[in-house]
Protein backbone atom coordinates (compact mmCIF):
# COMPACT_ATOMS: atom_id res chain seq x y z
CA UNK A 1 0.00 0.00 0.00
CA UNK A 2 2.70 2.47 1.05
CA UNK A 3 4.92 1.56 -1.93
CA UNK A 4 2.04 1.98 -4.40
CA UNK A 5 1.10 5.32 -2.85
CA UNK A 6 4.68 6.60 -3.08
CA UNK A 7 4.80 5.54 -6.73
CA UNK A 8 1.58 7.41 -7.50
CA UNK A 9 2.74 10.49 -5.62
CA UNK A 10 6.12 10.45 -7.37
CA UNK A 11 4.36 10.42 -10.74
CA UNK A 12 2.16 13.31 -9.62
CA UNK A 13 5.24 15.29 -8.54
CA UNK A 14 6.78 14.75 -11.98
CA UNK A 15 3.63 16.04 -13.67
CA UNK A 16 3.52 19.13 -11.43
CA UNK A 17 7.20 19.85 -12.10
CA UNK A 18 6.62 19.50 -15.85
CA UNK A 19 3.75 21.99 -15.72
CA UNK A 20 5.74 24.50 -13.66
CA UNK A 21 8.83 24.26 -15.87
CA UNK A 22 6.72 24.72 -19.02
CA UNK A 23 4.94 27.72 -17.46
CA UNK A 24 8.25 29.30 -16.51
CA UNK A 25 9.64 28.82 -20.03
CA UNK A 26 6.44 30.12 -21.61
CA UNK A 27 6.41 33.21 -19.36
CA UNK A 28 10.04 33.95 -20.17
CA UNK A 29 9.24 34.04 -23.90
CA UNK A 30 6.05 36.10 -23.44
CA UNK A 31 7.89 38.70 -21.36
CA UNK A 32 10.35 39.15 -24.25
CA UNK A 33 7.78 39.45 -27.05
CA UNK A 34 4.73 41.01 -25.37
CA UNK A 35 5.67 44.60 -26.34
CA UNK A 36 5.64 43.58 -30.01
CA UNK A 37 2.20 41.93 -30.01
CA UNK A 38 -0.44 44.03 -31.80
CA UNK A 39 -3.86 42.45 -31.17
CA UNK A 40 -5.54 44.55 -33.87
CA UNK A 41 -3.73 42.44 -36.49
CA UNK A 42 -5.82 39.38 -35.60
CA UNK A 43 -9.37 39.83 -36.99
CA UNK A 44 -10.61 36.60 -35.39
CA UNK A 45 -10.24 38.08 -31.88
CA UNK A 46 -10.14 41.85 -32.49
CA UNK A 47 -13.94 42.22 -32.49
CA UNK A 48 -14.18 41.19 -28.82
CA UNK A 49 -11.08 43.08 -27.61
CA UNK A 50 -10.74 46.81 -26.92
CA UNK A 51 -7.04 47.62 -26.84
CA UNK A 52 -4.41 46.63 -29.36
CA UNK A 53 -1.60 46.33 -26.81
CA UNK A 54 -1.10 43.04 -25.00
CA UNK A 55 -0.90 44.56 -21.50
CA UNK A 56 -1.11 47.96 -19.78
CA UNK A 57 0.71 49.39 -16.76
CA UNK A 58 -1.65 50.85 -14.15
CA UNK A 59 -0.47 53.65 -11.88
CA UNK A 60 -2.04 53.76 -8.38
CA UNK A 61 -3.98 56.92 -7.56
CA UNK A 62 -4.67 58.82 -4.35
CA UNK A 63 -7.84 57.64 -2.63
CA UNK A 64 -8.41 60.99 -0.91
CA UNK A 65 -11.99 62.18 -1.33
CA UNK A 66 -13.26 58.86 -2.69
CA UNK A 67 -16.11 56.82 -1.22
CA UNK A 68 -15.66 53.13 -2.08
CA UNK A 69 -17.95 50.26 -1.07
CA UNK A 70 -17.18 46.56 -0.85
CA UNK A 71 -20.12 44.13 -0.92
CA UNK A 72 -20.21 40.41 -0.17
CA UNK A 73 -22.67 37.73 0.84
CA UNK A 74 -22.46 34.73 3.14
CA UNK A 75 -24.20 31.39 2.61
CA UNK A 76 -24.74 28.34 4.80
CA UNK A 77 -26.94 25.44 3.79
CA UNK A 78 -28.11 23.08 6.52
CA UNK A 79 -29.73 19.81 5.46
CA UNK A 80 -32.39 18.11 7.55
CA UNK A 81 -34.76 15.17 7.12
CA UNK A 82 -37.86 17.23 6.44
CA UNK A 83 -36.35 20.35 4.85
CA UNK A 84 -33.21 22.25 3.92
CA UNK A 85 -32.46 25.60 5.51
CA UNK A 86 -30.43 28.27 3.73
CA UNK A 87 -28.88 31.06 5.77
CA UNK A 88 -27.76 34.14 3.83
CA UNK A 89 -26.35 37.51 4.77
CA UNK A 90 -25.35 40.49 2.65
CA UNK A 91 -23.09 43.25 3.96
CA UNK A 92 -21.73 46.46 2.48
CA UNK A 93 -18.67 48.17 3.93
CA UNK A 94 -18.32 51.80 2.79
CA UNK A 95 -14.93 53.52 3.06
CA UNK A 96 -14.80 57.33 2.97
CA UNK A 97 -11.18 58.36 2.40
CA UNK A 98 -9.95 61.68 3.79
CA UNK A 99 -6.78 63.61 2.90
CA UNK A 100 -4.62 62.23 5.73
CA UNK A 101 -6.13 59.96 8.37
CA UNK A 102 -7.49 56.45 7.81
CA UNK A 103 -10.93 56.08 6.19
CA UNK A 104 -14.25 56.61 7.95
CA UNK A 105 -16.16 53.33 7.68
CA UNK A 106 -19.93 52.82 7.42
CA UNK A 107 -21.87 49.56 7.16
CA UNK A 108 -25.12 48.58 5.50
CA UNK A 109 -27.55 47.39 6.78
CA UNK A 110 -25.29 47.36 9.87
CA UNK A 111 -21.96 45.96 11.03
CA UNK A 112 -23.28 42.44 11.78
CA UNK A 113 -26.82 41.97 10.40
CA UNK A 114 -28.86 38.90 11.29
CA UNK A 115 -28.81 36.14 8.65
CA UNK A 116 -31.87 35.66 6.48
CA UNK A 117 -33.38 32.16 6.89
CA UNK A 118 -35.03 30.48 3.89
CA UNK A 119 -36.55 26.96 3.86
CA UNK A 120 -36.01 24.86 0.71
CA UNK A 121 -38.36 22.16 -0.55
CA UNK A 122 -37.28 18.53 -0.58
CA UNK A 123 -39.21 17.95 -3.83
CA UNK A 124 -36.38 19.70 -5.68
CA UNK A 125 -33.51 17.76 -7.19
CA UNK A 126 -30.05 18.18 -5.69
CA UNK A 127 -29.01 20.38 -8.65
CA UNK A 128 -32.08 22.59 -8.20
CA UNK A 129 -31.42 22.86 -4.46
CA UNK A 130 -27.85 24.00 -5.20
CA UNK A 131 -29.14 26.53 -7.73
CA UNK A 132 -31.79 27.89 -5.37
CA UNK A 133 -29.28 28.29 -2.53
CA UNK A 134 -26.85 30.13 -4.81
CA UNK A 135 -29.62 32.37 -6.17
CA UNK A 136 -30.73 33.23 -2.63
CA UNK A 137 -27.20 34.46 -1.84
CA UNK A 138 -26.96 36.46 -5.08
CA UNK A 139 -30.36 38.08 -4.44
CA UNK A 140 -29.26 39.18 -0.95
CA UNK A 141 -26.04 40.72 -2.34
CA UNK A 142 -27.85 42.53 -5.16
CA UNK A 143 -30.46 44.00 -2.80
CA UNK A 144 -27.72 45.32 -0.52
CA UNK A 145 -25.94 46.84 -3.54
CA UNK A 146 -29.13 48.54 -4.71
CA UNK A 147 -29.69 49.95 -1.22
CA UNK A 148 -26.13 51.30 -1.08
CA UNK A 149 -26.67 53.05 -4.42
CA UNK A 150 -29.82 54.63 -2.98
CA UNK A 151 -28.49 55.52 0.48
CA UNK A 152 -24.90 56.63 -0.24
CA UNK A 153 -23.18 58.72 -2.87
CA UNK A 154 -20.54 56.15 -3.82
CA UNK A 155 -17.80 56.63 -6.42
CA UNK A 156 -16.87 52.97 -6.75
CA UNK A 157 -18.68 49.77 -5.74
CA UNK A 158 -16.68 46.53 -5.59
CA UNK A 159 -18.75 43.34 -5.62
CA UNK A 160 -17.20 40.09 -4.48
CA UNK A 161 -17.85 38.02 -7.59
CA UNK A 162 -19.10 38.44 -11.13
CA UNK A 163 -21.40 41.16 -12.46
CA UNK A 164 -23.36 38.49 -14.34
CA UNK A 165 -24.99 35.25 -13.29
CA UNK A 166 -23.04 32.01 -13.70
CA UNK A 167 -24.52 29.56 -16.26
CA UNK A 168 -24.72 26.83 -13.61
CA UNK A 169 -27.21 29.02 -11.68
CA UNK A 170 -29.67 29.07 -14.58
CA UNK A 171 -32.40 26.41 -14.10
CA UNK A 172 -34.48 24.96 -16.96
CA UNK A 173 -37.55 27.02 -17.84
CA UNK A 174 -39.93 24.42 -16.36
CA UNK A 175 -38.12 24.20 -13.02
CA UNK A 176 -39.70 25.49 -9.80
CA UNK A 177 -36.45 27.40 -9.26
CA UNK A 178 -36.96 29.39 -12.47
CA UNK A 179 -39.14 31.92 -10.66
CA UNK A 180 -36.26 32.73 -8.27
CA UNK A 181 -33.91 32.98 -11.26
CA UNK A 182 -36.27 35.52 -12.90
CA UNK A 183 -36.24 37.51 -9.65
CA UNK A 184 -32.44 37.58 -9.70
CA UNK A 185 -32.41 38.69 -13.36
CA UNK A 186 -34.73 41.56 -12.44
CA UNK A 187 -32.36 42.61 -9.63
CA UNK A 188 -29.38 42.54 -12.01
CA UNK A 189 -31.20 44.80 -14.48
CA UNK A 190 -32.19 47.20 -11.69
CA UNK A 191 -28.56 47.30 -10.59
CA UNK A 192 -27.21 48.07 -14.07
CA UNK A 193 -29.75 50.85 -14.64
CA UNK A 194 -29.32 52.43 -11.21
CA UNK A 195 -25.49 52.36 -11.33
CA UNK A 196 -25.58 54.12 -14.70
CA UNK A 197 -28.16 56.66 -13.48
CA UNK A 198 -26.16 57.44 -10.32
CA UNK A 199 -22.85 57.65 -12.17
CA UNK A 200 -21.32 55.02 -9.88
CA UNK A 201 -18.57 52.77 -11.20
CA UNK A 202 -19.55 49.12 -10.76
CA UNK A 203 -16.74 46.54 -10.57
CA UNK A 204 -16.82 42.79 -9.93
CA UNK A 205 -13.75 41.22 -8.30
CA UNK A 206 -13.53 37.49 -9.03
CA UNK A 207 -10.95 35.94 -6.70
CA UNK A 208 -10.73 32.40 -8.01
CA UNK A 209 -11.76 32.59 -11.64
CA UNK A 210 -11.70 29.39 -13.68
CA UNK A 211 -12.17 31.21 -16.98
CA UNK A 212 -10.07 30.16 -19.98
CA UNK A 213 -11.04 32.92 -22.43
CA UNK A 214 -7.55 34.47 -22.58
CA UNK A 215 -6.01 31.01 -22.94
CA UNK A 216 -8.33 30.46 -25.93
CA UNK A 217 -7.39 33.82 -27.47
CA UNK A 218 -3.68 33.05 -27.08
CA UNK A 219 -4.28 29.68 -28.69
CA UNK A 220 -5.68 31.52 -31.73
CA UNK A 221 -2.97 34.16 -32.13
CA UNK A 222 0.27 32.49 -30.96
CA UNK A 223 0.60 30.10 -33.94
CA UNK A 224 0.78 33.22 -36.17
CA UNK A 225 3.22 35.02 -33.87
CA UNK A 226 5.50 31.99 -33.60
CA UNK A 227 5.96 32.01 -37.39
CA UNK A 228 8.38 34.91 -36.92
CA UNK A 229 11.86 33.26 -36.93
CA UNK A 230 13.21 34.86 -33.73
CA UNK A 231 10.03 33.98 -31.80
CA UNK A 232 10.05 30.47 -33.23
CA UNK A 233 13.61 30.02 -31.97
CA UNK A 234 12.73 31.27 -28.48
CA UNK A 235 9.67 28.98 -28.31
CA UNK A 236 11.64 25.89 -29.34
CA UNK A 237 11.07 23.11 -26.80
CA UNK A 238 8.14 24.91 -25.13
CA UNK A 239 4.91 22.93 -25.57
CA UNK A 240 2.76 26.04 -25.42
CA UNK A 241 -0.27 24.42 -27.11
CA UNK A 242 -0.47 21.79 -24.36
CA UNK A 243 0.03 24.46 -21.69
CA UNK A 244 -2.80 26.61 -23.06
CA UNK A 245 -5.18 23.63 -23.01
CA UNK A 246 -4.60 22.87 -19.30
CA UNK A 247 -4.29 26.42 -17.92
CA UNK A 248 -6.79 28.85 -16.48
CA UNK A 249 -6.41 32.51 -17.43
CA UNK A 250 -5.09 33.65 -14.05
CA UNK A 251 -2.42 30.90 -13.95
CA UNK A 252 -1.28 31.71 -17.47
CA UNK A 253 -1.20 35.49 -16.99
CA UNK A 254 0.80 35.08 -13.80
CA UNK A 255 3.74 33.85 -15.89
CA UNK A 256 4.30 37.23 -17.57
CA UNK A 257 2.28 39.98 -15.84
CA UNK A 258 4.15 42.12 -13.31
CA UNK A 259 2.62 43.80 -10.24
CA UNK A 260 0.48 46.75 -11.32
CA UNK A 261 -0.12 45.47 -14.85
CA UNK A 262 -3.40 44.43 -16.45
CA UNK A 263 -4.15 42.19 -19.40
CA UNK A 264 -5.93 43.33 -22.55
CA UNK A 265 -9.68 43.91 -22.14
CA UNK A 266 -12.38 41.76 -23.75
CA UNK A 267 -16.17 41.70 -23.79
CA UNK A 268 -17.93 39.42 -21.29
CA UNK A 269 -20.35 38.44 -24.07
CA UNK A 270 -17.53 36.72 -25.97
CA UNK A 271 -17.47 34.11 -23.19
CA UNK A 272 -21.22 33.51 -23.31
CA UNK A 273 -21.00 32.24 -26.86
CA UNK A 274 -18.77 29.45 -25.62
CA UNK A 275 -21.31 28.22 -23.06
CA UNK A 276 -24.32 26.12 -24.04
CA UNK A 277 -26.30 27.01 -20.89
CA UNK A 278 -26.29 30.74 -21.61
CA UNK A 279 -29.65 30.94 -23.35
CA UNK A 280 -30.67 34.32 -24.72
CA UNK A 281 -32.80 36.58 -22.52
CA UNK A 282 -33.19 40.33 -22.20
CA UNK A 283 -30.37 40.56 -19.66
CA UNK A 284 -27.89 39.08 -22.13
CA UNK A 285 -27.83 42.40 -23.99
CA UNK A 286 -26.07 43.84 -20.94
CA UNK A 287 -23.27 41.29 -21.30
CA UNK A 288 -21.90 43.43 -24.15
CA UNK A 289 -21.58 46.32 -21.67
CA UNK A 290 -19.50 44.27 -19.23
CA UNK A 291 -15.76 44.27 -19.89
CA UNK A 292 -13.20 41.88 -18.44
CA UNK A 293 -9.52 42.18 -17.63
CA UNK A 294 -7.03 40.68 -15.17
CA UNK A 295 -5.03 42.85 -12.79
CA UNK A 296 -1.87 41.78 -10.99
CA UNK A 297 -2.51 43.49 -7.65
CA UNK A 298 0.18 41.84 -5.50
CA UNK A 299 3.69 40.63 -6.25
CA UNK A 300 3.24 37.02 -5.12
CA UNK A 301 -0.47 36.51 -5.78
CA UNK A 302 -2.26 35.45 -8.95
CA UNK A 303 -3.92 38.20 -11.03
CA UNK A 304 -7.56 38.82 -10.11
CA UNK A 305 -10.32 38.88 -12.69
CA UNK A 306 -11.96 42.31 -12.86
CA UNK A 307 -15.36 42.88 -14.49
CA UNK A 308 -16.40 46.44 -15.32
CA UNK A 309 -19.82 47.77 -16.34
CA UNK A 310 -19.65 50.44 -19.05
CA UNK A 311 -22.11 50.95 -21.92
CA UNK A 312 -19.86 53.57 -23.56
CA UNK A 313 -17.72 53.15 -26.68
CA UNK A 314 -14.34 51.43 -26.63
CA UNK A 315 -12.08 54.46 -26.14
CA UNK A 316 -14.02 55.75 -23.13
CA UNK A 317 -14.19 52.24 -21.65
CA UNK A 318 -10.42 51.88 -21.32
CA UNK A 319 -10.06 55.34 -19.77
CA UNK A 320 -12.79 54.69 -17.19
CA UNK A 321 -11.61 51.15 -16.52
CA UNK A 322 -8.00 52.19 -15.93
CA UNK A 323 -9.19 54.98 -13.63
CA UNK A 324 -11.11 52.41 -11.56
CA UNK A 325 -8.14 50.02 -11.53
CA UNK A 326 -5.85 52.82 -10.34
CA UNK A 327 -8.05 52.99 -7.21
CA UNK A 328 -8.30 49.20 -6.84
CA UNK A 329 -4.50 48.88 -6.86
CA UNK A 330 -3.71 50.78 -3.61
CA UNK A 331 -6.67 49.06 -1.95
CA UNK A 332 -5.09 45.67 -2.73
CA UNK A 333 -1.47 46.19 -1.71
CA UNK A 334 -1.71 45.35 1.99
CA UNK A 335 0.06 41.99 1.61
CA UNK A 336 2.43 40.76 -1.16
CA UNK A 337 0.80 37.31 -1.17
CA UNK A 338 -2.88 38.33 -1.10
CA UNK A 339 -4.02 41.06 -3.46
CA UNK A 340 -7.75 41.37 -2.71
CA UNK A 341 -9.13 44.93 -2.15
CA UNK A 342 -9.59 45.84 1.51
CA UNK A 343 -13.34 46.70 1.21
CA UNK A 344 -13.97 43.20 -0.18
CA UNK A 345 -11.95 41.59 2.62
CA UNK A 346 -13.88 43.52 5.28
CA UNK A 347 -17.25 42.73 3.71
CA UNK A 348 -16.30 39.05 3.41
CA UNK A 349 -15.36 38.86 7.10
CA UNK A 350 -18.69 40.38 8.16
CA UNK A 351 -20.88 38.46 5.71
CA UNK A 352 -19.46 35.07 6.68
CA UNK A 353 -21.92 33.00 8.73
CA UNK A 354 -19.98 31.11 11.38
CA UNK A 355 -20.57 27.60 12.71
CA UNK A 356 -21.48 29.12 16.09
CA UNK A 357 -24.14 31.35 14.52
CA UNK A 358 -25.56 28.41 12.60
CA UNK A 359 -25.66 26.31 15.77
CA UNK A 360 -27.45 29.07 17.70
CA UNK A 361 -30.10 29.35 14.98
CA UNK A 362 -30.68 25.58 14.89
CA UNK A 363 -30.83 25.43 18.71
CA UNK A 364 -33.41 28.21 18.68
CA UNK A 365 -35.41 26.38 16.00
CA UNK A 366 -35.49 23.26 18.18
CA UNK A 367 -36.49 25.24 21.25
CA UNK A 368 -39.42 26.88 19.45
CA UNK A 369 -40.56 23.76 17.60
CA UNK A 370 -39.99 21.15 20.30
CA UNK A 371 -38.04 19.02 17.81
CA UNK A 372 -34.71 17.33 18.53
CA UNK A 373 -31.59 16.72 16.45
CA UNK A 374 -32.71 13.09 16.21
CA UNK A 375 -35.89 14.27 14.51
CA UNK A 376 -34.27 16.89 12.32
CA UNK A 377 -31.02 15.38 11.12
CA UNK A 378 -30.62 12.91 8.27
CA UNK A 379 -29.62 9.34 9.02
CA UNK A 380 -26.04 9.71 7.76
CA UNK A 381 -25.54 12.65 10.14
CA UNK A 382 -26.50 10.42 13.09
CA UNK A 383 -24.26 7.44 12.30
CA UNK A 384 -23.00 6.21 15.72
CA UNK A 385 -20.20 4.20 14.04
CA UNK A 386 -18.45 7.24 12.59
CA UNK A 387 -19.13 6.43 8.91
Image (spheres, rainbow, N blue to C red):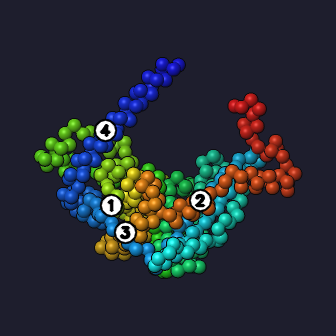
Can you see residue 283? no
Q: Is residue 55 left or right of residue 71?
A: left
Mark 2 highlights which residue?
349
| Mark 1 secondary-structure assignment | strand
Distance between mark 1 and mark 2 Cα atoms: 28 Å
Which residue: 59% across, 73% down? Answer: 106
Instruction: Identify the secondary structure beneath mark 2.
Output: helix
Mark carried by residue 261 = 1
Relative to residue 140, is residue 281 drawn left or right?
A: left
Closer to us: mark 3 or mark 1?
3
Q: Which label's residue is closer to the chain start, 4 or 1?
A: 4
Q: Earlier in the sequence, mark 4 or mark 3?
A: 4
- Residue displayed at 51% across by 72% down: 102
Of the two numbered discs 3 and 1 on the same chain, state the one appearing first in sequence: 3
Does residue 44 appear left or right of residue 165 in this picture? left
Q: Residue 367 location, x and y as percent?
A: 85, 54
Q: CA distance from mark 4 to mark 2?
A: 36 Å
Q: Earlier in the sequence, mark 1 or mark 2?
A: 1
**Quadrant housing the C terminus:** top right
Give neighbour class at mark 3: few <14, some 14-19, many 20+ (Cα, 10 Å): some
- Vertical comparison of 374 with 253: above or below: above
| x and y, in percent, of residue 30 in the image | 24, 50
| Residue 130 badge | none
Earlier residue among tags 2 and 3: 3
In the picture, the disc for residue 21 is 4
Q: Farthest residue toward the right?
A: 370
Q: Residues within 10 Å of mark 1 (few under 14, many from 20)?
A: many
Tag 4 near tag 1, CB within 8 Å: no
Amino acid sequence: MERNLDKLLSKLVEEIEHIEVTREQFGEVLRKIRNKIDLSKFPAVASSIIDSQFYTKIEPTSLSGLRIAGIDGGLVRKRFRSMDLVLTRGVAVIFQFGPEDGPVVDFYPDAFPEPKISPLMLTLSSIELDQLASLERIAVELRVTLSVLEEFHTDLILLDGSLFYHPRDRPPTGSIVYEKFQEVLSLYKQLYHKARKKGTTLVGIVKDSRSTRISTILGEILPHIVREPTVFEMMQGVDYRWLLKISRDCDLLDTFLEEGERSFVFRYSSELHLNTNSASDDISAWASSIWVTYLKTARDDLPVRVEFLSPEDDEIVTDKLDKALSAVLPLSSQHPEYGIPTPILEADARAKITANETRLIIDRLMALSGLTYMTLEKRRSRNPFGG
